[in-house]
Structures are given as structure tokens and as C-alpha cells.
Image (cartoon, rainbow, N blue to C red):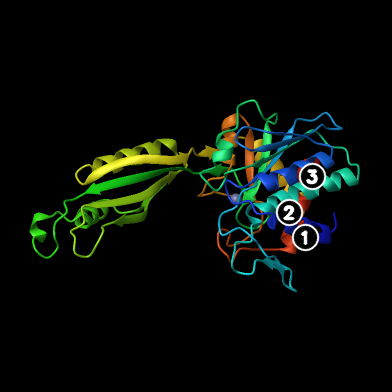
Amino acid sequence: MTPQKIFELFCELVTTDSPTGDEALLREKLQQKLQSFGAETEVDDAGNLRGFLPGTLELPVKMFSSHMDTVEPGRGVKVILDADGRIHSDGTTILGADDKDGITAILAALESIRAKNLPHGPLEFLFTVGEEKNLNGAARINPGWLRSKFAWVIDGPGEIGTIYANGVGKIGFTIDVKGKAAHAGICPEKGINAFVLASQGIMGMQPGNFGDATMNYGNIHGGIADNVVPDHVTLTGEIRSSNPARIRELQKKLCDHWKQWGEVAFTEGYPPYELENPALIRHTENVLQAAGYTPHLKRFFAGSDANYISKLGIDVCLLATGRAQNHTPAETTTLENLENLAFVVERLMLS
Ligand SMILES: [Zn+2]
């Protein structure tokens, strides 16, 4: 694919709105594209799209995956290409390079292999829904639906060449703190101000680093009016770690600590993952090196679809795409990144 064609494909994808929960139109387009390259396709109950292209060589099946959904504001994206090759939106929406740069790379690589008639092993493609909402598309994939034992998720932050072989797990929590309402002017002493209780609770267990885990209070709301002693505050937050035992420990600590002020309930999250296949990491490093990149193996402090794909018995690496400031209207990538990423994915498909 020429750089111009890669850019056109990227524009087509980012201008097809697909905020989480609204991926159907994009999925249809991707399904048609996969079929036009000779791949058979299937959509599961969650809405994830799988493609499979039989190989011309007897090799193990390899999978390439990206997510279809974007965060908001992600509707009506206008793509602007600067003279220096920088690509961004008009500033009113995200760009959607997260993760349509990954999808572009996979489709461009596939097209290139088909156009040049290059011999390859069997290839599997996975385009998920709901990644931005606690990875809930990948979470619902049925065991046995995917055929691969090796995969690359093309969705990481940082420079191309960066490999992540882990992902942290996360669990959300809600803390309900109950005080007692009273008239703030006539009899404040008859009330119990829930804000005071919540601040005592926060000061007694402050957010931040807990060894190899983190905890954050991210949202707080409560109270109804300036003349009422507030009887209720709700805090929400999250715990993250690569180590499932540490997550459980912090959950217990949080419950024990907060029990004198309120009630803790745990909400949605996802499990951590750690790739324990040095051969796959070495192979990925070798391919990146041969493609002209300096491979960097880094720790990842967020989650990706790799967290769940790994639970299906598939060894998976998460690769960086070169995009920056994703999840904001300042999100950018470059023509060079799109081209280079497609080249790297093509080398991996042929490796
Ligand atoms: Zn993403």
C-alpha cells in the first residue's frame, strides 16, 4: 500500500464513528474489507469480529488484534494533515488513532501481502468492541473461538519498537459514607456532616503507591444545598496492580479501613496479565530489529485487550503505535507512524 493509500484508509476508519457501544457500522466495513482480502469472518455474541485467512505455508496460526471502539468526544472526526506529516483532529473531538492506527496497520499489511502474493502462514484477525469500557468485548470472548496460540495487540502508547509483555489488573470501588442531615443554621449540631467523615477516611488512607500497587479516589459527590448538613457522600476509585494477590490485599485494607465511616463495594475491573514466553518476546524483538527499530521492552501500567486474550491460552505481546495524547482532543499521530506500523505488522505476519 502506498503512504497515500494508508492515509486514506486511516481517514476512512477515523471518520466512521465508533464510540463504545456504537461499533456496528465500523464492524461492517471491516468485515467487508477482510472478506475482500479472502478472509472468512465471524462476529460473536459480544460483537467482536474475527477474521481468518488460511496460510500458504504450514506454520502456527498468528493473530493480530486491535479494538474498534473509541472514547468520546469521538463523533464527526475531521482529520487534519499538517505539512510536516502530523495528523490531528480539528480540536473538537479525539482523532481516534486509538486504536484505528492499529486497524489501519493490520489491514494495510494484509493488503500488501496479498498484492505481492507473498507466502505466509495462517493469519487470524480480531477486532474487538468495548475495549475502552473495562475491556468488556475481549472479556466476553468464548474459549475456543480463536485458533491462535500467539498474538500481537496493536494498541500501546509510546514509540514504535516498544513491546509490553504485561498489563496491570484493575478493580473499581464505591464507598458510601452516611452522616445525618440537619438545618445548617438552626441546629447544625444535630447533624453529622458526611464530608467531615469522608475527609477523615481519606486522610487515614491516602491514595497513591502501595508497593507494586496503586490506589486512587477519582470521584466524589454528595450534599444537596448550602443550608443542609450533608448526610451522604459517595466516593469512587480504583486499585491497580500486576499482582492479583496485591489487589486482593488492598481490597481488604480498604474495607477494613473504611468500615468505621462507610461501606465499600467493588465494581467492574479486569485481571492482570504477564507474558511468560521469552521466545515470543525475543522473536518480536528480532522482527522489530530487522525492520530497523530498536526494541524496548517496557512495563505497562494500564490494561489492554491482551489482559483477556492471554486468559484464552494465547501468548500475546502489546505493541506501541507511536500515537500521542490519546483520549484527548489533542491526540496525534504522523504519516510516518502509520506507514512504519504497517511495515512492522507486515514483517510480523511474514515472520
Ligand atoms: Zn486503545
Q: Which residue is mark 1?
A: 7
Mark 2 vs mark 3, foreground winner is: 3
Mark 1 vs mark 3, foreground winner is: 3
Q: Position of residue 5 (x, y in %)?
A: 83, 58
Within 8 Å: ligand 1 and the Cβ of disc 3?
A: no
Q: Position of residue 241 (x, y in %)?
A: 44, 44
Mark 2 vs mark 1, foreground winner is: 1
Q: Quadrant of residue 88?
A: bottom right
Q: Amino acid at mark 1?
A: Phe
Q: Residue at x 90, y 46 (%)?
A: 115
Q: Is residue 161 visible?
A: no
Mark 2 to mark 3: distance in Å?
19 Å
Q: Which residue is mark 2?
A: 341
User: Does 139 appear above or below 211?
Assistant: above
Q: Tell me the SS state at disc 2.
A: helix
Q: Tell me the SS state at disc 3.
A: helix
